[in-house]
Amino acid sequence: MDNSGLLTVKEVAERLNISRYQVYRRITRGDLPAKQTREGNMHYVITEQAVQDYIAAGGADVLTSPRLEDLGMMRVSEVALATGFSVEVIRRMCKEGRLACTRGNGPKGHMRIPRSAVQKLLAGLSD
C-alpha cells in the first residue's frame, strides 16, 4: 500500500492547528473523510486532498456548532428567568409533558426548550 499522501490524525491536527480530539469529531460527523485502518482503537488516515478540500471549505469553521439562539432553543435556566418559574418547575413541566423539550444523549442529557413553546407558555399565563 502506498502511504504517500496519507496523513495520520496527529498530522492533520498539527496542520489544522486543532486537537486530535477535534479531528476525530470532524471524522465522526463526516466533515473530514477518513479511512479506518484498524478496528478497536480507531486508527484513521486522511488523504492530503481531503485536508486541502476541508481547508478550502472553511476549515475550523465547518464544525462550528450553531448557537442555541440560532436554533430557536433555550436552556432551562433561560426559560426559568423568562417565565419567573424556578428551574425545578421548568424541568418538572418538561418531564410531565406540559412544556415541549428535547433532551441530549444519555440519562443526564441537557434539556433544551423551543422558544415557540416558551412563547406559548407565556401567552397562556397572560390569559
Image (cartoon, helix red, strand yellow):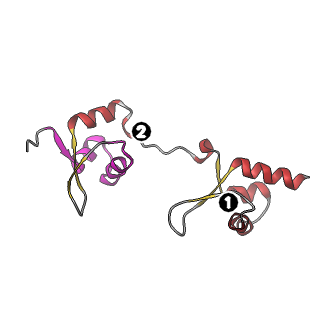
Q: Is residue 97 left or right of residue 9?
A: right
As helix, strand or loop, the secondary structure at mark 2 comes to: helix
**Image quadrant assignment for residue 94:** bottom right
The residue depicted at 78 percent of the width and 57 percent of the height is: 83
Q: In the picture, which quadrant includes the N terminus?
A: top left
Marks 1 and 2: in contact by CB < 8 Å?
A: no
For the residue carrying disc 2, how many other residues have a C-alpha within 10 Å: few (<14), some (14-19), or many (20+)?
few
The residue depicted at 73 percent of the width and 59 percent of the height is: 99
Query: Which comes before the other along the chain, label 2 or label 1?
Result: 2
Q: Is residue 125 left or right of residue 54?
A: right
Q: Position of residue 82 (x, y in %)?
A: 76, 54
Foreground residue among 52 and 15: 52
**Image quadrant assignment for residue 101:** bottom right
Most common secondary structure along the magenta stretch:
helix
Identify the residue under disc 1: 77
Q: Is residue 15 left or right of residue 91?
A: left
Q: Which residues are magenta?
A: 5-32
- Is residue 111 shown above or below 3? below
The outermost residue toward the top is: 56
Q: Position of residue 31 (x, y in %)?
A: 36, 42
What's the amino acid at mark 2? Answer: Val
As helix, strand or loop, the secondary structure at mark 1 comes to: helix
Q: Is residue 121 left or right of residue 91?
A: right
Viewer-nearest of discs 2 and 1: 2
The residue depicted at 33 percent of the width and 54 percent of the height is: 21
User: Is 10 within the magenta?
Assistant: yes
Identify the residue under disc 2: 62
Q: Position of residue 126 (x, y in %)?
A: 89, 52
Q: Position of residue 7 (x, y in %)?
A: 19, 44
